[in-house]
Amino acid sequence: MVKFMEKFKELPLHKDYWIGDCGTILSKKHNKKYGRKLMKRISNRYWTISIDSNFYKVSRLVYITWHGKLKKGYIINHIDGDRLNDCKDNLEQITYKQNIRHAHDVLKIKKRYSISYEEAQYVINNPKIGAKTIHEKWGIAIMTVYRIRKKPELYGDPKRFPERLL
């Protein structure tokens, strides 16, 4: 079994907290010598932490602490695609456009940005077919299926849908 010691630095914006190079956060407020480990939670598939009643993505705190400030217009990217891996060596700053390219090329994520009128009508007219089945058949996101079923009146007008380019 391999064990490693995380290295810690003081958070630049919060001097009462330390952050490890893999995202562990310690509070010096409660234990001045060793620090008390704070509990992280998952929000929108990322580790988040509450510090002084403000929520932060842990990956952003790790990046800023270990690599410096983010350039304007740049975001944090997880190189291996694992949003829960907040180790400093797995984080990089890239543009939003580069992040989308990374998702398509490296992670092989195929994202659809719109659905057709026919697809919306299929979802509305087949309420007994599960969202997962529709997702697998049509490639429609499961949350989109739920939204269509919750408010079908928003999807009844064919003029609302853009023409699909083939």
Image (cartoon, rainbow, N blue to C red):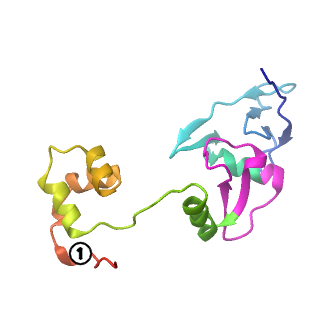
Q: Amino acid at mark 1?
A: Arg
Q: Which residues are magenta?
A: 64-93
Q: Find residue 39 and report its horizontal and vertical position in percent.
A: 64, 30
Q: Secondary structure at mark 1?
A: helix
Residue plotted at (76% across, 32% down): 26
**Residue 30: quarter of image:** top right
Residue plotted at (69% across, 52% down): 60
Q: Find residue 106 and report its horizontal and vertical position in percent.
A: 61, 58
Q: Is residue 153 above or below residue 78?
A: below
| Residue 153 is covered by the magenta coloring | no
The one nearer the camera, 81 or 67, is: 81
- Reading the image, the residue beneath label 1 is 160
Q: Find residue 49 and report its horizontal and vertical position in percent.
A: 63, 40
**Residue 16: quarter of image:** top right
Q: Is residue 157 left or right of residue 45?
A: left
Residue plotted at (66% across, 71% down): 73
**Residue 99: quarter of image:** bottom right
- Dot 1, how many residues are within 10 Å of its Cα: few (below 14), some (14-19), or many (20+)? few
Q: Is residue 24 left or right of residue 34?
A: left
Residue plotted at (17% across, 58% down): 122
| Residue 81 is covered by the magenta coloring | yes
Q: Find residue 50 and report its horizontal and vertical position in percent.
A: 62, 40
Mark count = 1
State which quarter of the image contains the C terminus.
bottom left
